[in-house]
Amino acid sequence: MASLDSVTEPVLDKDGVRLTVDDAVATVTLTNPAKRNAQSPALWRALAEAGRLLPGTVRVVVLRAEGKSFSAGLDRQAFTPEGFDGEPSFIDLARGGDAELDATIAEYQEAFTWWRRSDIVSIAAVQGHAIGAGFQLALACDLRVVADDVQFAMRETSLGLVPDLTGTHPLLALVGYARALEICATGRFVGAAEAERTGLANLAVPADQLDDAVRDLAAALLAAPRDAVIETKALLRGAQERSFEEQRVAERAAQARRLRDLAGVGE
């Protein structure tokens, strides 16, 4: 596997997002370090487009960011009367109708949903600050490898808002209700040691080893047959909604599919 951000021609490179593909590994890079990779509606649309552009050969998607910070969260320009060029300001959105506001937030959420697709495994490589929308973007991925300088924080409540970019579901699943509530309601920072201890991070490493650690994890994920990984991911994700007995049934059905596939027996 080549570098995390392949030297090949980008599939997408706009609005602070670059997508490159190296065979079975795609890399999505946030490319605005001067603004600590602050997020905007244009960036969210570019992230959603990156998901749509993934070739069928891709099995692992790495999400990374240039600079010292993964993402400082939503660009505060969103809260100014003028907002972003060519975009309705958040103030204007708040003054609009309920259906329009709901549809707009749903569109923003699309940038955060495709990372959970069953046909890929996504890894967030997180360094420095991952605040608000940045924290939720890291949570959108299946796995997280963090640098020892990472600082997660869910600051929305401190601003009078709520986390609305799909981060609450994975946060609760990872750390439990009480800790998730405390993290969100206080807006405090969560460092690398706590993130690894509580399950927010799969692995914490020195900052200069982050790329190598993610590269090794991606290679390990690629070592197993693709269909087995897809079935296993579906089993684990579905287990949150199934009873024990329902999970037993799902395991048997998945294993039957794998055995028939390995034996070359059709359904």
Image: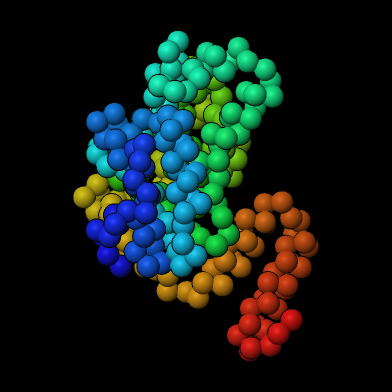
Q: Quadrant of residue 68?
A: top left
Residue 242, x across and y down, in percent: 74, 55
232 versus 116 height, above or below: below
Q: Quadrant of residue 31?
A: top left
Residue 248 as seen in the image, left or right of residue 220: right
11 versus 153 height, above or below: below
Residue 127, x across and y down, in percent: 31, 42
Q: Residue furthest left?
A: 208
Q: Quadrant of the N terminus?
A: bottom left
Residue at the spot 47% in from the left edge and 54% down from the top edge: 53
Residue 41, x across and y down, in percent: 46, 30
Residue 68 as seen in the image, left or right of residue 71: left
Residue 111 as seen in the image, left or right of residue 26: right
In the image, 237 versus 11, the foreground residue is 11
80 versus 146 height, above or below: above
Residue 252, x across and y down, in percent: 72, 73
Residue at the spot 77% in from the left edge and 61% down from the top edge: 246
State the count of labels.
Answer: 0
40 versus 45 height, above or below: above
Q: Quadrant of the C terminus?
A: bottom right
Residue at the spot 60% in from the left edge and 40% down from the top edge: 169
- Can residue 153 be seen here? The reply is no
- Can residue 43 be seen here? The reply is yes
Residue at the spot 63% in from the left edge and 30% down from the top edge: 103
By what rule are the colours in the image chosen?
Answer: rainbow
In the image, 218 versus 154, the foreground residue is 218
In the image, 223 versus 44, the foreground residue is 44
Q: Residue furthest front?
A: 86
